[in-house]
Amino acid sequence: MAQDDASKRAGPGPGDSVDVPAPSRRRSRLQRRVQVGYVASMVVGLAVAVSAFAESSGHAAAAPASSVEQARGMVSGLPFRDPRNLNTGTPSHLKLRLVAAATRFDLDGKRIWGDSYDGSYIGPTMHFRPGERVTLTFVNKLPTATNLHFHGMHVSPSGSADNPYISVPPGRAFVYHLNIPRDQPQGTFWYHDHDMCMGDEAMAMPGMPSTSPRSSSCADIESQIFAGLSGTIIVGDDRSLLPPGLRHITAHTLVFKDLQIDKAGHILQNAGDISIDSDLPTVRLVNGELRPVLTMRPGQTELWRLSNEGADIFYKLRLDGYRFTVIGQDGYPSALVTTANTLLLPPAKRYDVLVTAGADPGQTWLRTLALNTGPGGDSYPDVELMKLRVAGTPTTPRLAMPTGAVPTAEPTLATAHISRYRILKLSESPDGSVMYINGKTFNPNKSIFSTPAVLGTVEQWTVYNESSEIHPFHIHTDHFQVMSINGVPQRYIGAQDIVPVPYKRHGVAGYVVLRIRFTDFTGKVMFHCHIAAHEDAGMMSFINVIKPARRS
C-alpha cells in the first residue's frame, strides 16, 4: 500500500496542526482573493464588468441592508411553483441550448438585476437519462467569461464534457458533449458556473479562441453563482426505484438560494470596495419565491428533491412536526433508507426525501434553523422558508415506506483493497484572505499530489481542517464513501460528492476519512471546498487519473 509523497510531508495526523487565528466573520470576501496570484487579473476584469453592468442600469452598487429591507417589494405566501423545465423528453440523443445573460428578474413582484440561464433566476431544470447522449450548445451573452459544471454527474472531466478548464468568452458559444453512462445513478444533480479565471491558461477547444485577461473580463465563481447562474439536473426518475405504491407520487424540486440586494436593485457582486459576505443579512428563497405555500392532502406522500444551489450559505432544514425519509443524497440512491428530523445542506448538497402529510388539516413551516459554522465562519438565523398547508380530501390507504437499500445503490467500500493513502490539509491565512490545501493555493497546471491515481483502484483520503470554520469538501466525477468523522466510524448510508469537514477545536484539526473508487474516466479530477468564496481564494486542486500500466 503506497502513500503519496505529499502525504508523507503533510505528517501523520492532526497533532502537528498549527492554530490559525480566527478572521473576522465580516471580512471582505474580495480580500480573500487578492493575495492569490492567479486571481489578480480577475479582479480587474470583474471591476470592469460590474461597472459596465451598473452603468447600463443607471445605478451604482451599495452594501446590503437588513433582510427585511432587501425583501421589501416581494410578495410572500404565493403558491409554490416548481422550476420550469428546459426539456421533458429524453431521446437517445438529446440536443439542448442554454443562454447565459445579464437579466432583470421579477422575483415575487420585485425587479432585481442579476445573471441568468435562459432568463430565470432559478435555472431551468435539465432532464437526462442513463445511456443518453447530450449535445448542449451554451451561449455566453454575459460581459464576462463563464462555463458550465455538471455537478455530481459521472461523466468525463476532459475534452468538451464536464471540463472546468473550458472558458467561454463573452459573445461566444461552446458545444458540450456528454455521454451519460448506462449505469449513471438516478437522482438530483445540478449545474453552475465553474470558470476558474485562468486567463492564458484556459483551454482553447476546437473552434474557440484562447481567453486572456486582455481580451475578456472574468468574474469569480462566487459572483457568478450568487448572481443566479445555477440550475437543477434530474437523471431518470428515482421514484421508479421505490415500492410500487410510491412510483407515481407527486414530485417537487425545491431549490434553495439566497441573495443580497443593494439599494439600486442589483444582486451584490465582488467589485471595488463592495463584496459578497455570507455573514451579512441575506434573503433566502425557495425556487426564487419568498415563503411560498405548498399544499398537500391529508395523508399524501410526495417526493421532495432538496438542492442547495447557492454560492456560500448553509441550510439546516427542519419541517416542523415531521420527519424526512431519505431515499437518496447527492444524486445517488440510498444504500440504507433513513429518517431524520433535520438535514444539513452545505453549498451544493442535495437530498431526495419522502414527506407524508399529517392526517388532519393544518399548516406548518419548512425552515432553516439557526446555525454557526465556526468562530471564523458565519452565524445564520432561524428563517421560515416555505409553508406546508394540509387541506382537502384525505388519501387512503397510507403508503408503505421503503426500507433497506434502494435498488442500484452503490456498494460499500468498507472491505475494498486500498491502493494508496493520501492526506489533505485545508487551511487559511491568518486574515482569511487566502485558502490552501496542503499549504498551496490552486495551480491549474500542478496537482498538490506528486503521484496520480490509477483507474479502477480505491484510495483512502484523510481530509484535515486546520481552520476555524467548516469546509464542505467536494470531489468531481466520482462519488465517495465517508468512513469516519473526527475518528467516529460512520454507518454507510450511501455514496456522496460533498461532506462538511469539522473545524479545529482546542488546537486539534477536525478530519474526515473517505474512500473513493476511480472508475471509467481519466484526466484532471478537481476537488475543492464548495463555499465558492473559498475555492476562489485558492482552496482547490486536482488529481490526475491515469490508466493502469500494461502488464508485460
Image (cartoon, helix red, strand yellow):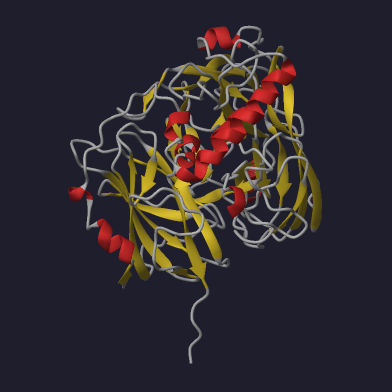
Q: Can residue 479 be seen by looking at this rendering?
A: yes
Q: Who is closer to the viewer here, 396 or 83? A: 83
Q: Who is closer to the viewer here, 150 or 537? A: 537
Occupied quadrant, residue 134: bottom right
The correct choice, above or below, for 79 with respect to 347 in the image is above
Occupied quadrant, residue 220: top right
The correct choice, above or below, for 205 with respect to 110 in the image is below
Q: Who is closer to the viewer here, 395 or 129? A: 129
The correct choice, above or below, for 113 with respect to 300 in the image is above
Which quadrant holds the N terminus? bottom left
Asked whether, in this view, residue 385 is left or right of residue 239, the answer is left
Residue that appears at 67% across and 30% down: 122
Asked whether, in this view, residue 368 is left or right of residue 225, the answer is left
Residue that appears at 58% across and 22% down: 268
* Residue 411 screen position, x and y as percent: 47, 61
* Residue 23 screen position, x and y as percent: 32, 28
Residue sitting farthest toward the front = 214
Number of numbered tags placed on the structure image: 0
* Residue 142 screen position, x and y as percent: 72, 34
Q: Can residue 337 be seen by looking at this rendering?
A: no
Asked whether, in this view, residue 256 is left or right of residue 369, the answer is right
* Residue 36 screen position, x and y as percent: 44, 42
